[in-house]
Structures are given as structure tokens and as C-alpha cells.
Image (cartoon, helix red, strand yellow):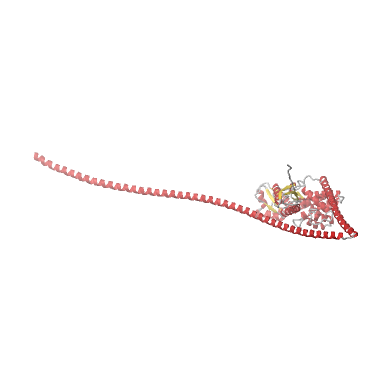
Amino acid sequence: METIVSQIALPEAVGTILGFLLGIGLAAIIYQVITKAKSKTFEQELQRQIEGAKREAENIIKSAQIDAAAEAIKKKEQFTSEMNQVRAELRETEVRLSKREDVLDRLSEQLDQREKSLRKQHEELDSRQHKVDLKDKQLSVLMAQQKNQLLKITAMGIEEAKGLLLKRLEDECEHEMAGLIQRKVDEATEVADEKCREIISSAIQRYATEQTCEVTVSTVEIPNDDMKGRVIGREGRNIRAFEKATGVDVIVDDTPGMVVVSGFNPIRREVARIAMERLIQDGRIHPSRIEELVAQTKKEVNQKVLQLGKDASVEVNVRGLSNKVLSLLGSLNFRTSYGQNVLRHSIEVAFLTQVMADELGLDGSVARRAGLLHDIGKAIDHEVEGSHPAIGANYLKRFNESPTVLNAVAGHHGDVPADNPYTPLVAAADAISASRPGARRETLERYIKRLEKLEEIAAGFKGVENAYAIQAGREIRVIVDAEKVDDESAMKVARDIAQKVEDEMTYPGEIKVTLLREVRCIEFAR
């Protein structure tokens, strides 16, 4: 039984051993498989970490590149800003240098002018020195002659000496007579000046208009900006037809509610203004309607102009004027000179001339006629070449005006010599009317610039200490240094200032130059 048991137990032990060995082998195999799998997993993980490190390195490189690019852009912008600042400073420096260069140029010009003035003064001094030398020589000769005459007188007889004394006494009497005549002439001039002032003052007091300043504005108001398109028309046909019919320029710009009519002829400008207003009121704006309305307006304006001329002649009581002359006279109502209505100015001059003529015992009707017609040339001076006095005189010759009136018209600005007393009266009345306060106007800016220019011209002469524009710019008062300007050169300085004002400035009427030279002697008693 034990043998059987032992026989049965032996195979079981072998099987157990074999099973154990197989388990160990299987475990070894499984361990190797697991080891290989872990090794492969570790390699993959390592590879992923390497790739992640590479990607992170690339991101770091890209970020560094971006930061570097941003820093480069920032540096570039900073450099550009600094360059712009440097360029601005260079431009400012260039502007300052340019201004300094201009100042240096002006100083150079002033130095050149002063050098020329000094050269001229040296020449004048040389000339005066030469004249003084000649006078010294002449004085020496005269003294020698006097000595010779005295020597002769000592050897003369009574009759010869008496004749010589009488001759010298006659020369002295002639000299005193010449002085007396000069004093009488000066007294007569003073009396005449006083009389002229009285006559002019009387004329101004007896005739004084309320207002002679008027402004003519050639503008047309429109209800809305859509009307501008209708005024222009399709492809500009309406505005071309209007300009062709009236002979003026129509300016349609961005100015709201306004159309400007521009033209040299005042009558055509007035016709265009009225026609444009009527077209806008009517609303029918097309070429045929424009021509019809302009023709109708021309007739009405011509009748109005003729009526204005007739009214002016009736007001001044001047008769016998042709309708053509009356039409020109009426057209002066649409002409202004420094803002003064020329027709009202002519009527005022006519009455002023008559008042002064009556004071002098002259014919008042001739004076009124000459005064009314003195500016008739201004009605056509934009069509005929020449000055308006000459144009007016030549036009009036066709209607057989008297030589007195023609000379007054042609010579009221001094263009031709006066051959009758009415010409200076018309010139005086013209100056009175133009210089009346409020008669003519200038803008404040132009007025101030004119006064500054007047003082600048006077102050530019050597020896002038101060210069003041007074009497609303009609007089410049100049104060000179008595040590630099003597009595003889004072008249020359005043004349040179007046000449330079005439050459460089434009002004109505005349400007008086008053030069003052004062010598002050100061001493102290101690």
C-alpha cells in the first residue's frame, strides 16, 4: 500500500517541480516582456520630452526673435523721432539763419544808402567849399578894387567924388527899394491868404451837405443755394447767356445766399444787377428769357440815368446840356471815388464854386456849370485812355462848351495851366468836397498803414528826430536835430520828403510837410 502510495506520490512531485520550473520560466518571460515594454515606454516618453524640449526651445527662440524685432522697431521709432526732432531743430535753425540773413541784407542796404548819402553830402560839402573859395577870391578882388577906388578918391576932384558918392547912394536906394517891394509883396500875400480863407470858410458854411459818402455793392441775394444751379444752367448755358447779354462777369462761389456781378462799366453792372434780381424773382431762367429781360432792363436803366442827369442839372440850375452829356452825368451816380458818390460830389462842387465865385464878384452860373461838369470824364475813363480831366474836356468840346468851362474841367487837377479864375475855384471846391469829414472813407487797416508809411518815409531821412502824421494823414510834422540840419538844408529835407511821399504813396488830395528846427541854448547862473 505504501509502495502504491509512493509510486503515486513521485509523479505528483515531478509534476509540481515541473510546474514550478515552468512558472519560473513563464515569470522570467513575462518579466522580460514587461521590461521590454517599460523600456519602450521610457524611450517614447524620453522622445516626447525631447520633442517637447525642442518645441519649447523653438517657442523660446521665436519669442526671443519677436522681442528682438519689437525692440528693433522701438529703437527704430525712437531713432526716427530723434531724427525728426533734429530735422525740426535744423529747420528752425535754418529759418533763424534766413531771418538773420534778411536782417543783414537790410542792414547792408541801409549801410549802402547811408554810404550814398554820405558820399552825396561829401560832394555837397566839396561844392560848398569850392563856392566859399570862389567867394573868398571874389571878396579879395572886391577889397582890392575898394582899396584902389579909395586911392583914386584921394586923388579925385570934388565933382568926381560927388558922382561916385551919388552912384553908391543910388545903389543903396535901389537895394532898399527892392526890400520894400518884397515886404509889400509879402504883406499882399498875407492879405490874399487871409481873404482866401474867409472866402473858403464862407463857402463851406453856406453849403454843407449831410452826407456825401455812398457805397455801391454789385451783389444779388438769392433765396437758397439751389437757385445758384438754376442761375448757372445746364452746362453753364444760362450764365453764359447772361454774361453775353450784359457784358459783365457773374461770380457764383461758395458764399451762401449771394451772387456777385463784376464789371468795369457801372451802367452795365447796374443793368446786370437789376436783371439778375428780376430773374431770380421771376424764376424762369433760360437764355431767351434772359435776353428779353436784359433788353427791357437796359431801356429802363438808360431812362433812369438820363433822368438822374436831368434832375442834377435842374438842382444845380445848369441849362442847355445835351442828352448825351446828361446821360454821362447821370451815370456818375453809379460811380464812386474812395466811397464818395461822384454825382453828389459834382453837385456839391458846383455849389461850392458858385459861392466862392459870388464872393469874388464872378459869374455864378459859369462857376456852377464848370463845377458840375468837372468830373464828367470819370463816366468814360474806363473806356477811353487818359486822365479823366483830359477825357472830360475832349468830350465836352464836341458840344461846343465855352473855353472857360473846358479849361476848368481839364485843369482842376493842375494838368494844364489855368487861363481863367474859374479853374482854381473848381480845384479848390473839388479839394473841399473830397476832404470834408465823412466824404471819403478808407478801411481802418489801410488808414493806419498809410499813416505808418508816411511817418516811416519822413523818419528815414538823416537828421530827423521825430515824425508825426496829423490832420488825419493830411499833414506830416517833422522835427529835425538842429546840430545835424542847418537852416539851408532844412528846406531841402522838407522838399525831399514831399517828393518821396509823392513817388511812393497814393492818397487823395495833398499832404503838407511841416519841418521844425529848434535851437535851444541853456546856461546856468551860479
Q: Nearer the viewer, residue 167 or 97?
A: 167
Specify the quadrant that holds the N terminus. Answer: top left
Whether residue 407 is visible: yes
Q: As drawn, is 496 to the left or to the right of 365?
A: left
Whether residue 339 is visible: no
Across and down, in percent, residue 67 comes to 44, 48
Across and down, in percent, residue 407 comes to 82, 56
Across and down, in percent, residue 248 comes to 71, 54
Q: As drawn, is 504 to the left or to the right of 89?
A: right
Specify the quadrant that holds the C terminus. Answer: top right
The residue lying at 86 percent from left, 61 percent from top is 152
Q: Nearer the viewer, residue 139 or 70?
A: 139
Q: Residue furthest right?
A: 159
The residue lying at 28 percent from left, 46 percent from top is 38
Across and down, in percent, residue 130 comes to 75, 59
Q: As drawn, is 6 to the left or to the right of 62?
A: left
The residue lying at 26 percent from left, 47 percent from top is 36
Q: Residue furthest front?
A: 155
The tally of labels here is 0
Q: Residue furthest top?
A: 1
Q: Nearer the viewer, residue 327 or 283?
A: 327
